[in-house]
Amino acid sequence: MKKQVLTITLLFAIFLSACSPGVAEGMFSMPLPSDGNFIAFNVSIAVEPDGDKHIAWSECLPAGDFSAYCRVIYQRTRSGEIGPRLVFSSPDHGYYMANIVALDDGRAVISFYQTFPGSICRARYAIIPNVVSSLPAINLSIPGDSVNSSCYSKPVLVSNGTTVYTVVDEDHADYIHSYLYRKLQPALAPSAAYVVAADLTRSTDDNAALVAGIDDSNTLHTTWTTRRRESGSSTYTYGLEYANNNGVSGNLSPIDITDSTLWVGNIDMAVQSATKARVVYAEPTVPSTSLWVATIESGVVTQSQISLTPSLEWTLVIPTISNYGGTANQVVVFSAKNNTLSYAQIFYKLLSGGGSPAQITDTNGINRHNYMADVVPLSTTYLAGWRSFHGDCPENAAYSTSGGPPITAFVSTGGCTLYGQTMQTGLASNGDWVAGAWIDKLTSAADAPLVTWISFNTNTIYIPLITR
C-alpha cells in the first residue's frame, strides 16, 4: 500500500483548524490550481458524513484560444491534502457546467453537459468510486439522448446520501422549456419522466429556475418559476409551481403556489417530509419587494409573509432557506437593501418565531454589496455564507454561524469577472462538517489565472498522519 507524508499545506491547516468540527470559526481556505492555461468557473461542492469534500468545476481556455475544448475537473480532499483528481475532457467536444453530490459510502455522482454545435447541450453523469483508479464511464442522463438543454444552468442533482435524482431542463424553443427527472442511485431508473411538460401550443411556456430537494424517505421535491402566454394573447402570467414524486413513478402533477400577473423570482426550498416542503420567494412589487414562505403539505398550499417594514422600500431581495437541527425548524437568509441602506446587506429570520429579520452585515461604510447568500445546516444550528461585491465584482467570502457576527473566510485576490457562471459559489454541509467554494485568482498578480478556492472547517483529532 502506497503511503505519503502529508503536505505542508495540511500541516498549516492543522494549525489554523477549529478545535471542534461543529465550530466554523478558524476555517481554512486554499486554492485548487489548474494545469496549463485553463480558467476555472462554475464550481460545486459536496460533503460526506466523515468530512471528505468532493469538488467539481468547469474550465475553459482564454478567449481566442481554440486549442482544446472546455472540460470538467473533479477533486477530492478531506483536510487540505490533495486527493484524487479526475479530468473529464474530449478532443471532439466540450464538457461544461458541473454539479456534484456525495454519497454516504464515499462515492460521488457528478453531472455536466456535453456541448454540440449550434449551442446545444445534453446532460451526462458519472459515478466516482470511493477508491479512484481510472476515469469512470460517462453516461447519458436521459436515455436515448433526445433532450436538448439550454446550457444556462447546471443539471440539477440532489441526494440524501443514498438516493440520487437528476433533473434536466428540455429546451423546446426560446421561450418554451420543460423539466425531466430520473433516479440515478441506488437503482437506475430505466427512463426519465416529466416534472413539468411545457404546453407546446403556447407562444410562451417558460418553466425555469428549478430547485430540488430530497427527504429521508427518498421523495424528490421540486419547485420552479413559470412564465406563460397563450397563442394570440399579449398577456403574460407568472407564478411558482411545485411537485413531488411521493407514490408516483412517472410524470409528476404540478400544483400552483402562486399565479398572477406579477413576476416572481429568486426562490429556494427546504423539504421536511415526503408530503411537506417550504418554498421561500420574493415578489418584486412596487415600491417595495415582499418576501413570502409557502408551506406545501399534502398538496395544500399555505402562504405566510415575512415582515419587511414597508416604508423602507425593500429591493434586491434574494432569499435562501434551510432546515436546521432536524426538519422541524427553518431559517431564511437573504440579501436586500432599502432606503436606509445604500448597499445590499445580509439578513436572517427564524421561521419558528415572530418579529422582523435581523441584519448580519453592515458594509455601507466600505461601499460594498453582499450577494450570493446561501445557508446550510451545521450540527444543531446553521451557517450562512456569501460574497461581498464592489460594483459587479465579487470580492471577499464571509460566513456567519447562528446569525452571529460575520467572519471573513477569504480576502479576494482580485479575480473580477462579469460572467455569471464564473461568479457561482457553492456551500455544502454534512453533520458537523461544512465547506464552501468559489472562483478567484490564484494570486493577486495581474496575470494569475482564475482558479477554484475552497474553505472548510476541520478537527485535528480526525486528521490522519498519512494518506493512502
Image: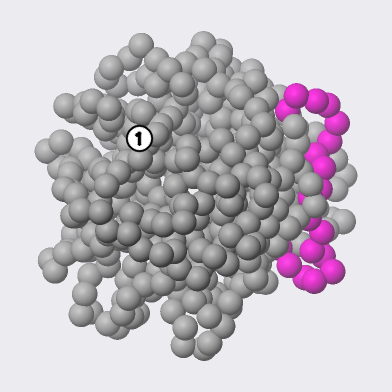
Q: Quadrant of the N terminus?
A: bottom left
Image x and y of residue 132, in percent: 25, 51
The kind of residue on which mark 1 rests is Asp
Image quadrant holding the C terminus, namely bottom left
- Measured as percent of width and height from the top left, residue 286 is found at 73, 45
Residue in the picture at 69% in, 35% down: 381
Q: Position of residue 37 (x, y in %)?
A: 33, 80
Query: Which type of secondary structure does the marked residue at label 1 adopt?
Result: loop
Q: In the image, is residue 451 above or below residue 285?
A: below
Residue corresponding to mark 1 = 105
Residue drawn at (58%, 78%), measured in percent from left and top? 414
Q: How many marks?
A: 1
Magenta stretch contains residue 15: no
- Say whether residue 359 is magenta: yes
Stretch in magenta: 351-370
Q: Is residue 19 left or right of residue 376?
A: right
